[in-house]
Image: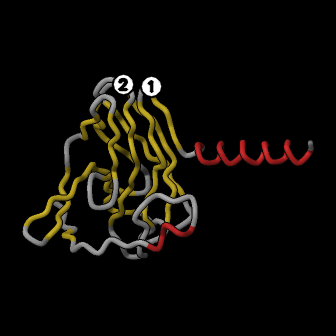
Amino acid sequence: MFRTLFLAALMCAATLGAQAHDYNLGDLKIVHPWARATAPSAPAGGAFLTIVNGGASDKLLSASADVSNVVELHTHITEGNIVRMRKVENIDLAGGSETKLAPGGLHVMLIGLKAPLKEGASFPLTLTFERSGSITVEVNVQGLGAATPSHGADAAKHMDHKPMDHKQH
């Protein structure tokens, strides 16, 4: 009996822990906001997350955070063999869709970092949507080479090796 209760409590705690880094705002679900750690002299960093829209179309209009001087919504475009980042005015969130902000694609750009993003740290990021309003989420900082969100140390083993132009526009 005690063993069954103990196992049930462990399973419940594991489920709550897995869901603890998801946020709900109306019909939107923001899943696992994260960032890569940055080198000590890095002038910029990126924040990533997934937005699941269970309702009508919406738009991510902006993001803000105190860890950098400027926060912009960005995408990557390929010109020849060069991948360049470009600011976008907003990110469309079609109804009934999932939109990933991930390395190599759409992301939140943190320009003019006030201090390096250190693995294991976290910071608040406020997201503002056209229909749904605003929400502040906690962004967990993962390893320097992290390619996907992780709840453990194994995700930091993957690196993105694409050439990149980090010029500001």
Which comes sooner in the sequence, label 2 or label 1?
1
Whether pointer 2 and pointer 1 mark residues with C-beta atoms closer than 8 Å, the reply is: yes
Can you give x and y, in whole percent of width and height, for residue 146 in the image? 43, 67
Can you give x and y, in whole percent of width and height, for residue 51 in the image? 38, 40
Above or below 101: residue 166: below
Which quadrant of the view contains residue 47?
Answer: bottom left
Residue drawn 51% across the image and 48% down it: 138
Quadrant (top left, top right, bottom left, bottom right) of the N terminus: top right
Quadrant (top left, top right, bottom left, bottom right) of the C terminus: bottom left
Mark 1 is on which residue type?
A: Gly
Side (left or right) of 135 relative to 108: right
In front here: 101 or 73? 101
In front here: 99 or 37? 99
Which quadrant of the view contains residue 135?
Answer: top left
Can you give x and y, in whole percent of width and height, for residue 167 in the image? 18, 67
Residue depth check, mark 2 versus mark 1: number of the one nearer the observer: 2
Side (left or right) of 106 relative to 35: left
Above or below 50: residue 159: below
In front here: 74 or 69? 74
Instruction: Sort mark 1 into few (<14), some (14-19) or many (20+) by Cα contacts within 10 Å.
Output: few
Which quadrant of the view contains residue 158?
Answer: bottom left
**Residue at which label 2 appears:** 55
Mark 2 is on which residue type?
A: Gly
Total residue callouts: 2
**Residue at which label 1 appears:** 26
Q: CA distance from mark 2 to mark 1?
A: 8 Å
Residue drawn 25% across the image and 40% down it: 91
Q: Which mark is residue 10?
A: none
Can you give x and y, in whole percent of width and height, for residue 23 in the image? 51, 38
Above or below 71: residue 19: above
Residue drawn 20% across the image and 51% down it: 87
